[in-house]
Image: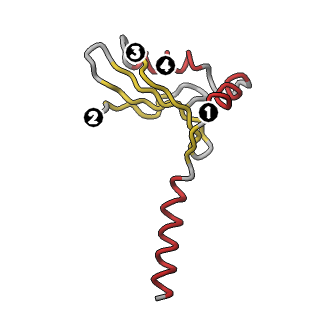
Amino acid sequence: MNKLAALLATALIAATAGVAQARDLGPDEALKLRDAGTIMSFEKLNAAAIAKHPGSAVEETELEEEYGRYVYQVELRDAQGVQWDLELDATNGEILKDHQDD
């Protein structure tokens, strides 16, 4: 029974470790990072996302810290009504992920 409890505890720790690696940043913290030059301006990040899907509009944005990296998440809707989810490196605008929302 002790082996089973230890195994379950280990599995729980492993499962929660991945979750703890990403955290949402609030507006105040995001603005401080922008003002310090740590991340790009939100306007430039939005422009980089829109450049990937010209004619689209930003619907929602979020800044997270994932594994020590600042990731800017953008939801776009293009002229055909298709929704796109993009992730950009907030420090340089590099597109990390770009996929159509299902």
Lower position in the chain sequence, tag 4 or tag 1: 1
Image coordinates of residue 101 in percent, x first then y, are 31, 32
Lower position in the chain sequence, tag 2 or tag 4: 4
Query: Mark 3 near mark 1, Cβ–Cβ under 8 Å?
Result: no
- Amino acid tagged 4: Ala
Gap between marks 2 and 1, in whole Å? 27 Å
Quadrant of the rendering where the C terminus is positioned: top left
Disc 2 marks which residue?
Answer: 102
Of labels 2 and 1, the one closer to you:
1
- Amino acid tagged 1: Gly
Side (left or right) of 29 relative to 17: right
Disc 4 marks which residue?
Answer: 48
Label number found at residue 57: 3
Of labels 4 and 1, the one closer to you:
1
Lower position in the chain sequence, tag 3 or tag 1: 1
SS of the residue at dot 4? helix
- Determine crowd level at label 3: few under 14, some 14-19, many 20+ residues with C-alpha closer than 10 A: some
Look at the picture and state if 14 lies above or below 85: below
- Amino acid tagged 3: Ala
Disc 1 marks which residue?
Answer: 26
